[in-house]
């Protein structure tokens, strides 16, 4: 359990500040993560990586010459926001374009994708290569659905070395895709990990058992097996990976044995000896292996084995020099320090004309956000526990961070005399910025869409309320690409929007329509217990998810009910 902190909510930022203080030779702090503190040649492709905090050496520890140009660093186990990714990429690029690379998780795909769109719109050519090395998370025929775990390192290293060699963006992207295709990983856990400030681990493993197929965000494994001997464990890992090797695999392979947090190096070395013997007996030649902590999961007791299948081209870039805080290979000439400017984006939309009606409704919007915050605070721990059943356990804390930031931004904007659209734009941006993860992006987009739809009018009607609810629905569905039955927030959102719109069309009051819609959302959220997840981090753990409702749907239902109660209070006065 993590014991050293002041404020658990600030753990990731405080740790990142200390990491930079200890590694100024390599990295500089920018708003959203870290970038190289040394000069990079003009026109070199910038490989920008990232993900949630809690995985050191990934991701910030891999920033430096021969590897990544920058790392966007989200909160604990939460994807960085689109703004964070954008600012890190902008501060990293030197005119050769940007390659974004990260593990295939829904929140990361959303946020990095939004940043990519913004960078491309500004003329900074940006591509993405997802890492999909975890063989336990999807079958071979659905390889594109697999998540990224310790195989991140091979993709980042090859891409970074290709950029260092002066190759253009097309070639860096091609090699990163090739490296990902040649990488396979499988992990096991003996005990779960505990988020800073939490009293319990995200999951537990029964005594005398181990969990097979775990994720790196505190997700439990796919199945539990009796705890094996070292030789039996080595055989399980090697056999599983050899059965899944790429069709282009040769006989030269890089084994990477990765400790996830509390497995001691002596144990890793012991196991690696068994693994090497099995690979050699299979007729494989071991090339420049790695054994140690490379992608961790806080204090998780567990490990993963990655096999990176080489050809002459991939071997050249794997063997190329790199010099970063956590990964060093070969020798590189010293680099001169550079001045790093951290980009600051406007958090509001100044200059929007606000009518008296818009300003008055903005005050109501601040009240609604406060009510949402109240219900999230009340249920934060329960939402986290529900999410930990088949996910990473951060839904409660993520929602708390997001709504706290949204309320603070809305209050500041409203105090400055802003109208409804500006207030909700500020709130939405900060919700997405501070929450991270899929829910942060979705709620941020939804809040912003409501403000944009209502705009600044002289008066507001019931039809405007229905349009705002439909805009909220469309923003979440469009961005998240989820459908009814996927076991996501959408399963509660769609009946909410449908019920509300029908009630308004039938002449119902705002409070009454909200009450009916909230009940429909809550019932639909409960009904997700019978669904099998088809999206998000719970998808690989469908069996464990069955019988439990989706945390995103549950939190939406809770907020909808509280907002309906608030509306009834206002209407009665």
Image (tube, grey):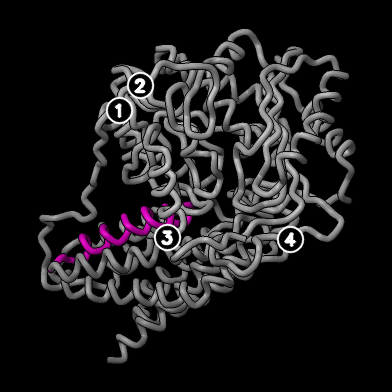
Q: Residue at x 50, y 39 (%)?
A: 59
Specify whether 304 is left or right of 144.
right
Q: Residues within 10 Å of mark 4 (few under 14, many from 20)?
A: some
Q: Is residue 478 something one can see in this rendering?
A: no
Viewer-nearest residue: 113 or 475: 113
Do callouts 3 and 1 mark residues in contact (Cβ within 8 Å)? no
Based on the picture, tell me whether residue 430 belongs to the magenta stretch: yes
Mark 3 highlights which residue? 10
Do callouts 2 and 1 mark residues in contact (Cβ within 8 Å)? yes
Which dot marks residue 337?
Answer: 1
Where does the magenta region start and end? 417-441
Q: In 3D space, how far apart are the residues under numbered discs 2 and 4 (Cα atoms)? A: 46 Å
Q: Residue at x 50, y 28 (%)?
A: 129
Q: Residues within 10 Å of mark 2 (few under 14, many from 20)?
A: few
- Position of the N terminus, as image quadrant, is bottom right
Seen in the picture, residue 58 relative to 183 is either above or below; the reply is below
Q: How many marks?
A: 4
């Amino acid at each position: 359990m993590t014991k050293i902190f002041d404020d658990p909510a600030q753990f990731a930022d405080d740790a990142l500040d200390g990491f930079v203080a200890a590694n100024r030779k390599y990295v500089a702090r920018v708003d959203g993560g870290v970038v190289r503190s040394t000069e990079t040649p003009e026109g070199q492709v910038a490989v920008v990586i990232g993900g949630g905090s809690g995985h050191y050496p990934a991701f910030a520890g891999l920033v430096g010459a021969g590897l990544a140009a920058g790392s966007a660093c989200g909160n604990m186990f939460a994807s960085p926001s689109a703004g964070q990714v954008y600012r890190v990429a902008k501060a990293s690029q030197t005119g050769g374009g940007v390659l974004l690379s990260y593990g295939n998780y829904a929140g990361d795909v959303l946020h990095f994708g939004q940043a990519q769109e913004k960078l491309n719109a500004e003329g900074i050519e940006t591509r993405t290569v997802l890492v999909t090395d975890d063989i336990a998370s999807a079958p071979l025929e659905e390889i594109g659905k697999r998540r990224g775990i310790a195989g991140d390192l091979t993709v980042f290293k090859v891409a970074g070395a290709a950029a260092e060699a002066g190759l253009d963006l097309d070639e860096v992207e091609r090699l990163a895709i090739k490296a990902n295709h040649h990488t396979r990983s499988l992990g096991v856990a003996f005990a779960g990990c505990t988020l800073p400030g939490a009293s319990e681990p995200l999951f537990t493993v029964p005594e005398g058992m181990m969990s097979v197929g775990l994720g790196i965000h505190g997700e439990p494994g796919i199945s539990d097996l009796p705890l094996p001997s070292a030789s039996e464990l080595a055989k399980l890992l090697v056999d599983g990976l050899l059965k899944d090797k790429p069709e282009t695999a040769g006989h030269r392979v890089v084994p990477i044995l990765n400790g996830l947090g509390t497995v001691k190096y002596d144990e890793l070395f012991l196991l690696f000896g068994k693994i090497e013997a099995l690979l050699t007996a299979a007729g494989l030649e071991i090339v420049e292996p790695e054994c140690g902590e490379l992608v961790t999961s806080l204090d998780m007791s567990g490990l993963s084995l990655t096999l990176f299948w080489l050809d002459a081209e991939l071997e050249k870039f794997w063997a190329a020099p790199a010099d970063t805080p956590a990964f060093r290979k070969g020798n590189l000439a010293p680099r001169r320090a550079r001045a790093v400017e951290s980009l600051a984006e406007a958090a509001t939309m100044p200059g929007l004309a606000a009518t008296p009606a818009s300003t008055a409704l903005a005050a109501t919007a601040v009240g609604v956000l406060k009510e949402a915050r109240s219900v999230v605070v009340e249920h934060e721990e329960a939402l986290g526990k529900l999410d930990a059943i088949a996910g990473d356990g951060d839904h409660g804390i993520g929602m708390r961070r997001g709504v706290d930031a949204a309320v603070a931004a809305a209050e500041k904007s409203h105090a400055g005399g802003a109208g409804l659209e500006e207030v909700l734009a500020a709130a939405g941006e900060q919700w997405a910025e501070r929450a991270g993860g899929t829910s942060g992006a979705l709620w941020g987009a939804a809040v912003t869409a409501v403000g944009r739809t209502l705009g600044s009018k002289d008066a507001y009607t019931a039809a405007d309320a229905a349009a705002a609810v439909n805009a909220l629905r469309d923003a979440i569905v469009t961005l998240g690409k989820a459908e009814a039955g996927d076991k996501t927030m959408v399963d509660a959102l769609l009946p909410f929007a449908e019920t509300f719109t029908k009630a308004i069309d039938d002449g119902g009051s705002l409070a009454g329509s909200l009450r009916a819609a909230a009940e429909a959302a809550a019932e639909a959220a409960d009904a997700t217990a019978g669904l099998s997840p088809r999206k998000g981090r719970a998808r690989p753990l469908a069996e464990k998810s069955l019988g439990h409702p989706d945390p995103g749907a549950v939190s939406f239902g809770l907020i909808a009910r509280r907002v309906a109660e608030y509306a009834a209070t206002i209407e009665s006065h």
